[in-house]
Amino acid sequence: LIFSQIWIFNSSALTDLDYRLSKLKNADASVSAIESFHGGNSAELSVDSDGNYARIYIYLDDPLPLEDLDQLSMWIHPQSGDGAVQVELYLDGDGDSRYDSKNVMDARLLSCKKSCSEMEMSNSKWNELDGFDLEYDKHKDKTFLSESLDACKSKLEGKSIVKIYISIFKDSNVSDTSAFIDYIKI
């Protein structure tokens, strides 16, 4: 019971949705009480010299129709390195409430990776990232040109979001890259 209460408290600080943190050999993603924007905790993502990325996985209880998405934001506090941020939306197109990479009705949108400096984020403070300010590509579809999220919503009408990944990619110019992420709102 105590563990459940701790887990509920931690998850409500990052997002009210079900989330998990990546567990990779050369990257760490953990709940941290060191720094937070909202609540008592945030997610701390760090990638060492041999790693590539660290990630937050968000699972929606019920699929959200893409056309109903009107907010996708989070707060990021870069710590070390000029890591790139990417948001991935996994979409169900056949109504089975899941994403299947082999199903042509389903789709995966990936934001174009942008470094924190490209997005003019400061290492000394929390910065808001609005997912609607990013450009997105449709995975494995060369005919789908990079578009705003609003344009993607109209092109992919009828599809529903089932999960979202938020990734921090390592800055290749430094030995490690880290950032805090908090207050994810969808």
Image: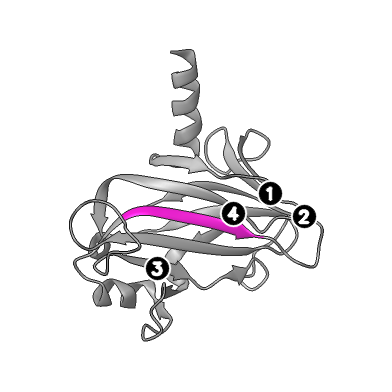
Q: Is residue 13 left or right of residue 163?
A: right
State the residue in front, 105 or 134: 105
Q: Quadrant for residue 17, please give it.
A: top left
Above or below residue 112? Residue 43 is: above
Q: Is residue 146 left or right of residue 50?
A: left
Name the residue that disc number 2 marks: 176
Q: CA distance from mark 2 to mark 3?
A: 27 Å
Q: Is residue 108 left or right of residue 153?
A: right
Q: Is residue 154 left or right of residue 119?
A: left
Residue that sits furthest to the top in the current view: 1
Name the residue that disc number 3 marks: 109
Instruction: Give the SS element for disc 4.
Output: strand
For the magenta stretch, what is the residue range? 162-169
Asked whether 145 falls inside the magenta stretch, the response is: no
Q: CA distance from mark 4 to mark 2?
A: 17 Å
Mark sitting on residue 76? 4
The disc, 1 or 3, on the residue closer to the chain's N-terminal end is 1
Identity of the amino acid at label 1?
Ser
Circles 2 and 1: CB atoms closer than 8 Å: yes
Disc 1 crowd, CA 10 A, few/some/many (<14, 14-19, 20+): many
The disc, 4 or 2, on the residue closer to the chain's N-terminal end is 4
The disc, 2 or 3, on the residue closer to the chain's N-terminal end is 3
Disc 2 crowd, CA 10 A, few/some/many (<14, 14-19, 20+): many
Name the residue that disc number 1 marks: 46
